[in-house]
Image (tube, coloured by chain):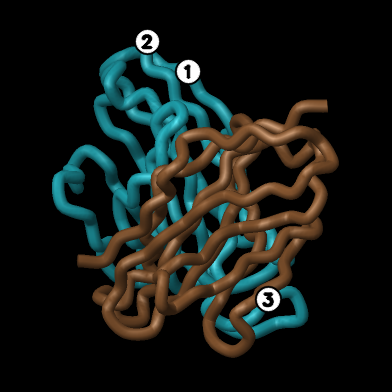
Amino acid sequence: GAVVSQHPSWVICKSGTSVKIECRSLDFQATTMFWYRQFPKQSLMLMATSNEGSKATYEQGVEKDKFLINHASLTLSTLTVTSAHPEDSSFYICSARVHRRSRLAGVNEQFFGPGTRLTVL
Amino acid sequence: AQSVAQPEDQVNVAEGNPLTVKCTYSVSGNPYLFWYVQYPNRGLQFLLKYITGDNLVKGSYGFEAEFNKSQTSFHLKKPSALVSDSALYFCAVRDVRSGNTGKLIFGQGTTLQVKP
């Protein structure tokens, strides 16, 4: 199947700093990417839907000024956690939805990245 | 309201025995159902999906799932469990309220523990 990468795979930062996480679809185009947050041994909580060329759609209760999303191209979406605090520590996972059918994936199929472990001290 | 429920936090099974991980759903209209597996500190890997057609869906790594409309269930099964199947399993349904965005609603997850 198609591959989605995330960078970095883990990051440790000081409280008050900003952290950027990249989500890339390596071999397919994705007009839509999703950002999830997962706490230990819990389910995935959808934070926002990232749309290429337009503003992200945030889920209820997610601060858009805190979690900035930019989907600048059909293969890249970024999530920036601004002024991070210890309660932002979590596992962040992205997924990408296939825009055009290819030999690797059918249209509208969704593939997940490996996740980014954020620890805020 | 649309939802997915995985009633078991953990399932324990001996290696070589059949396994079942339960999932029930509540959606309006026809459901698009998915199973994903997650290994520690990793993202989700797709196992299988039901869109339409045969109620028994075969997926990756020998897993299969049976769609039961009357019971609104989509249980994941495997005839013979392996220790390497030990992981966290998620059932998901596509959120039809979101139009064509492809948003998924996930269950709580079930930890599968296969003992040698």
**Image height of B90 relative to A11, above or below:** below
Q: Which chain is cyan?
A: A
Quadrant including the N terminus of chain B:
bottom left
Task: Please state the horizontal and vertical placement of residue B82, each as a whole percent of the image.
Answer: 82, 40
For mark 1, give the secondary structure: strand
* Mark 2 vs 1, N-terminal side: 1
Residue type highlighted by circle 3: Ala
Do callouts 3 and 2 point to residues on the same chain?
yes
Give the residue furthest to the top: A121
For mark 2, give the secondary structure: loop
The residue to which callout 2 is attached is: A121
Q: Tell me: B4 left or right of A29.
A: left
Colour used to depict chain B in the structure image: brown
User: On residue A12, which mark appears?
Assistant: 1
Task: Please state the horizontal and vertical placement of residue B93, each as a whole percent of the image.
Answer: 42, 66
- Nearer to us of marks 3 and 1 is 3
Res A6 visible: no
The residue to which callout 3 is attached is: A105
- Nearer to us of marks 3 and 2 is 3
